[in-house]
Amino acid sequence: MERIIGDKATDNAIADPKLYADPAAFHALFARLRREEPVRWTQPDDYRPFWTVSRHADIMEVERQPEIFLNDPRLTLQTIETEEAVLRFTGGDSHMIRSLVDMDNPDHRNYRGLTQSWFAPPNLKKLEADIGDLAKMYVDRMAGMNGKCDFANDVAVWYPLRVIMTVLGVPPEDEAFMLKLTQELFGATDPELKREEHSADETSKTVEDFFNYFSAMVEDRRKNPRDDVATVIANATIDGKPLGHLEAISYYIIVATAGHDTTSSTTSGGLLALMENPDQMAKLRANPDLLPGAVDEMIRWSTPVKNFFRTAKSDYMLNGQQIKAGDNLLMCYWSANRDEDAFDKPETFDIERKPNKHLAFGYGPHLCLGQHLAKMEIRTLYKELLSRIEHFELDGTPAFTQANFVSGLKRLPIRYKMAG
Ligand code: HEM
C-alpha cells in the first residue's frame, strides 16, 4: 500500500513547538486529523518522518502491545539537528540517558520494579503530612503577596519541585539549579527558557550538568544511605549486580524531571480552567468531595505530556494504515484526550466527568510511575487554595510554553482575595 503524502503545512504544524502554545489552534488541527486522517504519515521539515496517531482507541491499541511497539530507539520529537548533536555527544548512541521510558522488556520490568512500591499509594501515605505543609507554605506565600501573583511562576512551578526533590533527596539549596536544568530540557524550544548560548548542543550540555550533579549523589547514598528514592536507586541490584552508572543517573534524571514540570503544568492549567468555567469553580467550592474527579479532569484538560513515540518491531495494520517494521508512531495524548469517540463533550471542562479514561499518564506497562504522587500533590494544593482563597480572576494574558513534548502555562497572572 502506498503511503499518502499529505500537505506540508499540516506536517510542519504537527511538529511546530508554537502550535503547542496555542491550544485552540492545536485542537482545531487535531480534530480534523482525528476525523480525516487519524493515522497520518507525517514528514515535517527538519524532522525524521513518522505516523501521527491522534485517536484514543488507536493509541491504546499501540500501547497495550509493547512486544510489537517498542520505546527504543525513538522516544521524543526532536529535530534532526538535535538528534545529530546527541549522536556527537554520545559518540553514536541515540540516547543521552537510559531511563525507564527508554527501556523495553526485560530491562523495563526489572528497573521499574525497583521503585514501583515506593510510588504506590500505601507508601505515599508517609508523605501526606510533608506535602500538606508545603501546600500550606505556598498558600501562606500567596497570602503575603497583596492579592496578585503570577500563579505559574510564583506557585505552580515551585511546589511540585519541592515535593519531588524531597522524595528524591535533593537539598532545598539546589532546587533552583534543578528547576533551571529541567526547564531547559523540556522547554528548550521556547525562546524564553533556552540556555543563553544558542547552539544545537545545548540539550547535551544540560544533560551533562545533570550527570555531574547526580553522580555525586549516587556516591553519597552508597556511603550514607537515607530514607529517599536516591538511596533506593543507588543501592539497588538487578540479578545481583548494582545498576550501571548510566542507568542509575538516568533514573534520577527521570524522577527529577518527569515529576515536576508535568505536575506544575496541570496545577496552573487547572486553575485557568476553573477561572474560565466559574460554574465548575462554584461547584467544587460547594462540594470539596468532588476534588479527586476535578484533579483528573484538570489532568485530561492540560495533558502536559503531549506525546511519546513508539517504534514498530514488525509490520502492523493500524486503523487501515500499513505500518512497516521500523516506522515511528507519535502518540498524541492531548488529541486523544479530546477524542469525541472516547469522551462525551470533550471540549467541556467537567469536574464530574465519569468515566474519565484520559491518556495523560499514558497507558500499558509504561503508565506513569508517579501518577498517584502527582494526583495527591494537586489535590492537596487545591484543598488548601480553595479553603483559604475565596476569589480568583485573571489579571492579564496567560502564556503557554512553545514546546512540542512537555508543555503548559509559563505565565498565569492572577488577582485573588483571601478568605476572612
Ligand atoms: C500530572 C503529572 C504527570 C503527568 C501528566 C505524567 C505523564 C506521564 C506519561 C505520559 C508517561 C509515559 C507513559 C507511557 O509511555 O505510556 C509518564 C511516565 C513516567 N512518569 Fe509521569 N507524569 C506526571 C507526573 C509524574 C510524577 C510526579 C512522577 C514522579 C516520580 C513521574 C514519573 C514518571 C516516570 C518515572 C515515568 C516512566 C514510567 C515507565 O516508563 O515505566 N511522573 N508520565
Image (spheres, grey):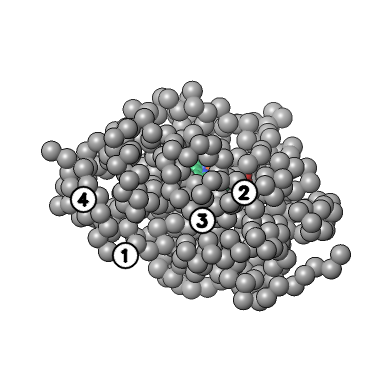
Residue drawn at x 37%, y 63% as measured from the top left: 399
Residue 232 to residue 176: above or below? above
Residue contact at pointers 2 and 1, CB within 8 angstroms: no
Residue 370 can be seen in this image: no
Question: Mark 3 is on which residue type?
Answer: Val
| Distance from Cα at disc 1 to Cα at disc 3 | 21 Å
Residue bearing the label numbered 4 = 416
Return the residue at label 3: 406
Quadrant occupied by the N terminus = bottom right
Furthest residue to the right? 1
Q: Residues within 10 Å of mark 1 (few under 14, many from 20)?
A: few
What residue is shown at x 34% (from left), y 54% (from top)?
Answer: 276
Task: Identify residue for label 2.
Answer: 341
Camera-near label (3 vs 2) is: 2
Circle nearer the viewer, 2 or 1: 2
Q: Secondary structure at mark 4?
A: strand
N-term-proximal mark, 1 vs 4: 1
Q: CA distance from mark 2 to mark 4?
A: 38 Å
212 above or below 122? below
Q: Where residue 134 sits in the image (x, y, percent)?
A: 31, 37
Crowding at dot 4, Cα within 10 Å, few <14 / some 14-19 / many 20+, comes out as some
Q: Nearer the viewer, residue 93 or 276?
A: 276
Task: State the separation of the CA atoms marked 4 and 3.
Answer: 28 Å
Q: To which residue does mark 1 refer?
A: 397
Amino acid on which the number 2 mark rests in the picture: Asp
Q: Do we see residue 397 in this rendering?
A: yes
Nearer to us: label 2 or label 4? 2
Q: Quadrant of ligand 1?
A: top right
Q: Residue at x 63, y 31 (%)?
A: 113
Q: Quadrant of residue 73?
A: bottom right
